[in-house]
Image (cartoon, rainbow, N blue to C red):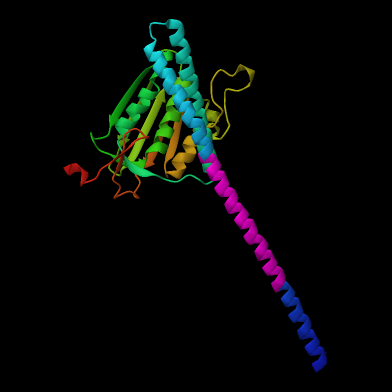
Amino acid sequence: MELTDEQLIKELNTRFENNHKLIEEQKDLMGQLEKMNEKLLISEKVQSMFLSNIRNEINNPLTSIMGLANELKEHHKDNEKFHKKADLIFTEGFLLEFQLSNIFIAAEMEAGETTPNIVNVDIDKLIDSTFESYRHLLDKKNMKYKYQSNIPGGESFKTDAEKFKTIICNLLMNAIEFSPQGSKVEIITLLNEDRLLEVKIIDEGVGIPEDSLQIIFDRFVQLDTGSTKMHLGHGIGLSVVKSLLEFMEGSIELSSKVNHGSAFTIHLPESHSADEMDEFAEDGNEFLFFDEDAQDL
């Protein structure tokens, strides 16, 4: 059926009007999407600021409390009752700080706020300082510890010191918590020719059933639950370890046998994004800066 000129013009006008409406609807939709995107950006910024502020507002006074408790404990060794109370305050503060740190790290990763901070790390000194930080927990259970390093002396490794220390802290805490009195925990490190760092944490603890070896890394999963729960934790630590390693392009393996202990082995490639980096970390917290001009002072 052929259209007359009048009908054709009418049809074209109708289509033009429809297209115009569609364009206006698209513009309106784009405007709504832009406003929504702005709100999301503001929300992310507020969330980021909140995480940063609340972390500082909790960590700063908690660190002060632990420092004062430790000072009181050391200066009142002759007063057994006072010493025990100060020691209890320090230990509870230490455990609270550990749990809060994991919660903040998990929240930051969930919010996409995690960023790499690559520096040259002295792995041996970092692990030694970590052992020293946990000495009081090891001593309470009369546990022995051993560190076997196969890293050439004085050789540094480029990685994120803070994240690496968080991984070691969680695995060491896990080994201490699930090991019996008088047992041993050992850390073995190896740096191969391909600059792949291997760290193995071995304990003589309760072990993990074979059917639970994979789910143990899932968030909030705890094998020890219910009214008979005997161990600390909220099922976050190992999930944080796995997430941080994936973020750093590393991996973790677990071998375990019930009542015979566990061995966690992490594999971490060296970062290539800090070839010109002059920062050097020894314990995951402090950074030393090397300046060629300053060496002549």
The part of the image, by quadrant, that contains residue 149 is top left
Image x and y of residue 157, in percent: 31, 40
Image x and y of residue 86, in percent: 45, 14
Residue at the extreme bottom: 5
Which quadrant does the C terminus fall into? top left
Q: Which residues are magenta?
A: 23-52
Q: Nearer the viewer, residue 148 or 25?
A: 25
Q: How many marks?
A: 0
Say which residue appears at 72% left-offset and 72% top-offset.
22
Image x and y of residue 140, in percent: 43, 14
The part of the image, by quadrant, that contains residue 27 is bottom right
Q: Nearer the viewer, residue 210 or 81?
A: 81
From the viewer's perspective, tell me whether residue 166 is left or right of residue 291: right
* Residue 22 seen anywhere in this rendered image of the structure: yes
Q: Nearer the viewer, residue 183 or 104?
A: 104
Say which residue appears at 20% left-offset and 47% top-offset.
293
From the image, give the main secondary structure of the stretch colored magenta: helix
Which quadrant does the N terminus fall into? bottom right
* Residue 258 seen anywhere in this rendered image of the structure: no
Say which residue appears at 57% left-offset and 46% top-offset.
46
From the viewer's perspective, tell me whether residue 289 is left or right of residue 18: left
From the viewer's perspective, tell me whether residue 265 is left or right of residue 19: left
Residue 225 is covered by the magenta coloring: no
Image x and y of residue 295, in percent: 19, 42
Residue at the extreme left: 296
Q: Is residue 162 above or below residue 22?
A: above
Q: Nearer the viewer, residue 65 or 27?
A: 65
Residue 43 is covered by the magenta coloring: yes
Say which residue appears at 28% left-offset and 39% top-offset.
156
